[in-house]
Image (cartoon, rainbow, N blue to C red):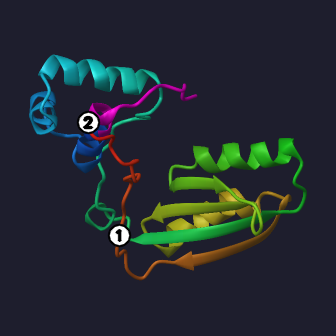
Amino acid sequence: MPTSISVDAIDLKLLDELQRDASRSNQAIAEAVHVSAATSLRRVKRLSDAGVIERTVAVLSPQALGHGLTAIIEVTLDRQTIDRIEAFEARAVAEAGVQQCYRTQGGPDFVLIAQVADMAAYQALAQRLFTSDANVRNVRCFFSVHRAKCGLQITLPPRPVE
């Protein structure tokens, strides 16, 4: 769970650089932010320890790896008791094909983003997650025909004047 920490202009610059390309060396990121490598490393560790940086990942091309079907799925449960919501959520996040899982309000109970190889793989996922769960009342699925953007960057607050 993230802890509350003070984030200054240098931290914001580091976060901006990391969001652009975290695969660069610490030295390259430090140079881009105009701080020493030691300062960069120390600050990035502090931001990671505080939960501001959740993890560092590589963003892969699904099509290049044979996962050409993206499904955006709305799930409504029959009963929304906390134990049933948490049980469905646990099953959804454990499913390898589910990339993102959101609890929502004002519409479906969950929105899932799934990346699978093809329609047969989607049907197998649907069987495991939806058909076999008596508490799933309704499922609406939308299949992507074109990915125009796949971003993970968060808009950072304006940097204080230095």
- Residue position for label 2: 14
Q: Which residues are magenta?
A: 1-12
Residue 48 spot, x, y in % from top left: 39, 26
Q: Looking at the image, tell me whether mark 1 or mark 2 is earlier in sequence order.
A: 2
Please report the residue visible at 53 percent of the width from the left and 62 percent of the height from the top.
Answer: 113
Residue 79 spot, x, y in % from top left: 90, 57
State how far apart marks 1 and 2 are (Cα). Answer: 23 Å
Side of 75 where 53 appears, left or right: left
Please report the residue visible at 37 percent of the width from the left and 70 percent of the height from the top.
Answer: 68
Bin the neighbour count of mark 2 within 10 Å (Cα to Cα): few under 14, some 14-19, many 20 and up. many
Using the image, tell me which numbered label, if any, was put on residue 116.
Answer: none
> Does 76 appear in magenta?
no
Please report the residue visible at 60 percent of the width from the left and 46 percent of the height from the top.
Answer: 93
Residue 87 sits in quarter? top right
Residue 51 spot, x, y in % from top left: 47, 29
By secondary structure, the bulk of the magenta-drawn segment is best described as: loop
